[in-house]
Image (spheres, coloured by chain):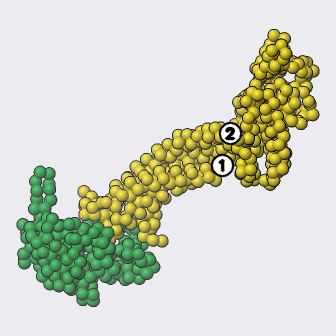
Amino acid sequence: MISVSGVTKAYRDGEVRRQVLRGVDLELAPGGTVAIVGPSGSGKSTLLNILGALDTADAGTVRIDGVDVSASRPAALAGFRNRSLGFVFQFHQLLPDFTAIENVIMPGRIAGRSAASLLADGLELLDQVGLRDRAADFPQQLSGGERQRVAICRALVLEPPVLLADEPTGNLDAASGEQVLELLAGLRRRRGTTMVLVTHNPEVARRCGSVLRLDGGRLTPA
Amino acid sequence: MGFVWHVALRYFRSTRADAHIRVLSSLTAGGLAVGTAALVLALAALSGFQNHLLTDLARHTPALQVELAGSGAGVPGEAAEEPAALVAWAAATNGVSAVQELLYARGWLAVGASVQQVEILGFEKAPPVWIPVGDRAARGLIVPIAVAQKLGLAVGETVRVFSPRPGLTPLGPRPRTRTLPVAGIYRSDRADYEELPVLLPLEEAAALFAGGDRRLDLTLEPEAEQELVAGFLRETVDPAKATVVGWREANRALLFVLRLEKSLVFSAVVLIVAVAAFALLASLSLVLSSKRSEVGALAAMGAPPARLQRIFLALGALLSVGGAGLGGALGAGVAAFLDRFRVISLPPDVYIVEYVPFLVRGSDVLIVVASTVVFTGAASLLSARRASRLDPVEAMRSART
């Protein structure tokens, strides 16, 4: 399902060229879950962005669900991201001009579906994370944890085959974090969703099928 | 409502919330309103003036003129028989209700030691309808008031008329001249934009100015189409003998100047809209800066670049349509008011009309709307293209820095 081979990535920081990824390889079967751990600045988010077709690798190939995301055109990649990938960002990235439910169903609106056809699924997801009664609130009316839960619902609303999450429980208290983890586990059980999670949280890592460590630009079993 | 308009409308609403964006977008809408109102007013004033001028011109110019060739050759009697045949031919044409033969020449009027060069118009039957002669039954020399004042003439007094063409006598060539009484003096309601002619009955004029330019003025029946009649006449007349000219063709230079004037005024005033479009560009740039991370998030969720571009095009339309619509309505309303109540008066002895007339034409409004769309569309497109080219990762990172 996810096949990463020889991916390298470097950034130019002024005059200095900083090599973030040095030949990363990763194979993940459909329905598999992997946690990527590593020190801050080790390139975990960069790897996640490359997997999510938000960033491009300097070298190597990334194939997700048979699609070579490293060779696709921007418009095709946009459609692929919308149909096949769900993102949970480290910082929730909710749209402040839209209510919680509008944020949740936004990927469906981008896909061309009507709000009415998405509403029931969106409200059910909010219900699962205990936020149904906050559906009409705007992000600035929600706490940090509530915003992150809304962001997770948004990533799941189209039930994508692949979920990429960057610190999904990073801003949540223990109870909310547990709710989110249960939600993700349920999704994997019901839909066989493939998940790549970047985390510092040992509990999140423990619940994944495998744990990989990114350090020095290389991915190794933790 | 589709995704693009859903997001654009929400962003439009959010421009009301941010003080900086609110001020700038209000200035944009205000600028567009002023620009479109100024454009509509300027074009309405020009259209009003031109409409008056053209109506006046049409009233004072025959629908069709047939200029006779061979006239003006300076050979007395040469064209004497041709006009009669051509008058009969023109009068028999479908759609022509009347034909008047005219003769144009230049000559002099002399009273005592005073001499005045004048344009002579020889007329058949009665003075042409476009010459505002009070007593149309008057036969004889009829002079415009300006000439009468210069020579100190009054009705009944005599004046000598000189032709530049000499007459042959047994004693050799002698100036052609005739002493005639003044039968009438006329005052034109037209401004001094052309020299007014001295009128003479055709037979008198032909005797004095045999080589003058001959012309037939054709009056058309009300339902006759000028172009059709002109086309028929052109096809049937021998071009060596006569040339058919419509009133628009006869006034081609003036009509060209009027069109040019309108184009130049439009070009000057449309700059206001261009400046307002720059303000729109600034507004949209500010909106894009404040929404940068959100645009990045939308791209990450799968919004393709073309749809992100359309969001900002739609936002540009929302920001500009109100201002342009308000300005257009304001301009048209003010123009209608100024015209209806004749608010701006003009000195009647200087202009052909006593007030500034305004005429709002649908075509003018369409041109204003189209130019506004072009300018604001271009401004919106610049911002929209920037939005579509945002790197989603960089854009989302900007929210955290």
User: Which residue, given by chain and number where applicable, does mark 1 sit on?
Assistant: B360
Q: Viewed as shown, does residue B94 lie left or right of A74? A: right
Label 1 marks a residue whose chain is: B
Residue at x 32%, y 67% (from the top left corner): B299
Between circles 2 and 1, the one closer to the viewer is 2
Is residue B18 visible in the rendered structure shown here? no
Q: Looking at the image, which residue is at 43% across and 53% down?
A: B378
Q: How far across and how far down the image is residue A173, in percent?
A: 23, 73
Name the residue carrying label 2: B251
Where residue A142 sits, quadrant-wise, is bottom left
| Residue extending furthest toward the bottom | A190
In the picture, measured across the screen, residue B76 lies left or right of residue B12, that is right
Q: Quadrant of residue B59?
A: top right
Q: Amino acid at mark 1?
A: Val
Q: Which chain is yellow?
A: B
B379 and B97: which is toward the camera: B97
Q: Residues within 10 Å of mark 1 (few under 14, many from 20)?
A: many
Disc 2 sits on a residue from what chain? B
Residue B185, compared with residue B260, is above or below; it is above
Quarter placement of the C terminus of chain B: bottom left
Q: Residue at x 52, y 56 (%)?
A: B321
**Residue type beneath disc 2:** Asn
